[in-house]
Image (cartoon, rainbow, N blue to C red):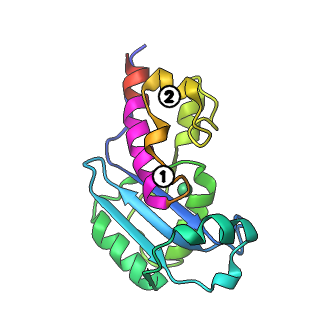
Amino acid sequence: MSHTVFSENIIFFDAEFTSLHPKNGEILSVAFVKPSGEELYLEITRDRALSDEWVTANILPMLDGNGISPKEACDKIREFIGKGEPYLVSYVSHFDTVFVHKLFGDSERPFSRYPIDFASMLFTAGFNPSNLLENDRLLSEAIGVEPSTHRRMHHALNDAQLLHETYGKLLRYIQK
Ligand SMILES: [Mg+2]
């Protein structure tokens, strides 16, 4: 069955945060990848003591430490995205979506308010939605993503690049 996506006005996005708690969590690092491959990676300065134990052990060591303020981050994200209000495509989208909206607060945001959840796309294509994170061989073999080339899972830029690559391959797979 032929299948067409609604829009190509999208941008891939991934973030890491201090906690998964919707009230307490704050973005520590965020990455955006345009369909052209153009990338933005930012880290935001936070009090390290506010991070959950798992985050302290697994996320903080991967940060390069060049943090900027939340306002500077919003300005850079607006500048990078520009005026087109693209749809943000993310994976395990509810967390990333909550925290990116929390980052912008009441200020103007440069992306669509309708999040595109890649896990739902996997689900409707017949794959377990947890496959991307768990490097499932079924998904790798079906659509040709080689997870072993992506060695820094839970690094926002790596995850956004992996999402960019997997999105294109999944579309080609379901359009066959
Ligand atoms: Mg991630």
Identified at 64% across, 82% down, the residue is 48
- Ligand 1: does it lie within 8 Å of the C-beta at label 2? no
96 is within the stretch colored magenta = no
Q: Which mark is residue 140?
A: 2
Residue 59: x and y in percent read 60, 66
Displayed-image quarter of ligand 1: bottom right
Callout 1 environment at 10 Å: few (<14), some (14 to 19), or many (20+)?
many
Name the secondary structure under disc 1: helix
Which span is picked out in magenta? 156-169
> Is the residue under label 2 in contact with that under label 1 (CB below 8 Å)?
no
Position of 168 with respect to 140 (left or right) is left
Residue 117: x and y in percent read 54, 45
Amino acid, disc 1: Asp
Q: Which mark is residue 159?
A: 1
Amino acid, disc 2: Ser
Residue in the foreground of this view, choosing between 65 and 171: 65
Identified at 49% across, 38% down, the residue is 147
Q: Earlier in the sequence, mark 1 or mark 2?
A: 2
Identified at 55% across, 32% down, the residue is 122
Position of 133 with respect to 21 (left or right) is left
Indicate the quadrant containing the C terminus: top left, top right, bottom left or bottom right: top left
Residue in the foreground of this view, choosing between 121 and 152: 152
Residue lying farthest to the top in this orientation: 1
- Ligand 1: does it lie within 8 Å of the C-beta at label 1? yes
Q: Quadrant of residue 154?
A: bottom right
Residue 87: x and y in percent read 41, 51
Residue 127: x and y in percent read 59, 26
Q: Which mark is residue 81?
A: none
